[in-house]
Image (tube, grey):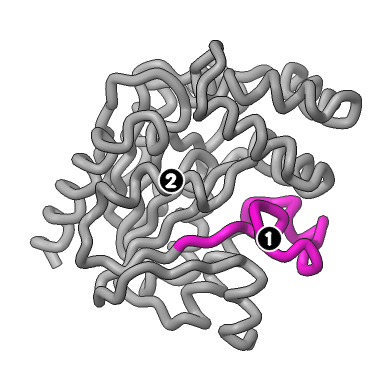
């Protein structure tokens, strides 16, 4: 068992508030916990907020990085499980952006007694086009070329991907921040996380869900289309899909008030049923 101090330092854990109910917030690929700052002021103030960075991202410890562990989403889910256990977190409402929706689902399967609800912002269980029954948005060869670009021109890769993610092609603070986050992430851990994110397929675990799930999808997202959200709602028990009119994959940064309204309503309904 890790000492709490070890995990707190390893994952750069930051805790706000002292409520009995907990909201844990998990950033997406290439991001870090600071990007929640737009949403935090809109959340209920009677919750304890737990923020962190995955190992290999943000200000987490690179000394703890393992290429083999973090080559799959299960490795990132273990970070969440470790934090929940060493801090003895209970009654956790988990908010995950993008791939962290899937990572949160994996963590909830591991510690179902600690995580009791999942909120997924622009999630996708698989970014690949599989067949006519499932179109994740990308052909495998296109994603392979994107990964290869990381080796050839890392800054160019960041400058190409950031506007695609935010949906904002012109110069904009959110796009600039995401570009900088991509550029400052260690290239080795970034490439490993990218491969784990874009080439994994976790559709099979959706039907096994046992927690209330709120899916928040943008109506115009180049990374996770509305059809992906509809697929998740259809295949995930106890889930509901809410579509936010907005462009891009980072609704918590570009539309925090709209996101917060749905989260607060979801938490109120969930708590009323407990």
Membership of 94 in magenta stretch:
no
Counting every numbered tag in the picture gives 2
Residue 160 seen anywhere in this rendered image of the structure: yes
Q: Please give left or right for residue 51 compared with residue 44 in the image.
A: right
Q: Residue 49 at x, y = what percent?
A: 36, 64
Read off the magenta span: 51-75
Magenta segment: does it hold 60? yes
Residue denoted by label 2: 206
Q: Is residue 230 above or below residue 9?
A: above
Residue 139 horizontal side relative to residue 210, left or right? right
Q: Where 73 falls versus 153 (above or below)?
A: below
Q: Which residue is mark 1?
A: 55
Q: Quadrant of residue 260?
A: top left
10 Å crowding of disc 2: few (<14), some (14-19), many (20+):
some
Residue at the spot x=79%, y=27% of the render? Answer: 155
Tell me the residue at 47%/28% (across/down). Answer: 249
């Amino acid at each position: 068992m890790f000492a709490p101090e070890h995990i707190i330092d390893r994952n750069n854990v930051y805790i706000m508030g002292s409520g009995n109910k907990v909201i844990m917030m998990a950033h997406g690929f290439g991001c870090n916990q600071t990007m929640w700052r737009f949403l935090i002021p809109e959340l209920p103030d009677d919750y304890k907020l737990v923020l962190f960075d995955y190992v290999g991202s943000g200000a987490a410890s690179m000394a703890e990085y393992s290429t083999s562990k973090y080559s799959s989403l299960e490795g990132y889910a273990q970070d969440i499980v470790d934090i929940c256990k060493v801090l003895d977190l209970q009654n956790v409402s988990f908010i995950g952006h993008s791939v962290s929706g899937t990572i949160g689902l994996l963590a909830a399967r591991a510690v179902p007694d600690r995580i009791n609800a999942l909120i997924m912002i622009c999630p996708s269980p698989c970014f690949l086009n599989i067949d006519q029954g499932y179109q994740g948005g990308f052909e495998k060869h296109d994603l392979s070329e994107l990964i290869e670009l990381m080796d050839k021109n890392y800054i160019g890769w960041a400058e190409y991907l950031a506007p695609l993610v935010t949906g904002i092609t012109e110069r904009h603070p959110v796009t600039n921040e995401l570009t900088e986050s991509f550029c400052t992430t260690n290239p080795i851990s970034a490439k490993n996380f990218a491969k784990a994110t874009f080439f994994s397929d976790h559709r099979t675990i959706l039907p096994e869900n046992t927690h209330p799930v709120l899916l928040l999808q943008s109506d115009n997202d180049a990374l996770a289309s509305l059809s992906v959200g509809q697929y998740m709602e259809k295949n995930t028990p106890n889930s509901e899909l809410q579509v936010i009119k907005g462009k891009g994959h980072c609704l918590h940064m570009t539309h925090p008030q709209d996101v917060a309204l749905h989260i607060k309503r979801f938490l109120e309904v969930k708590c009323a049923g407990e």
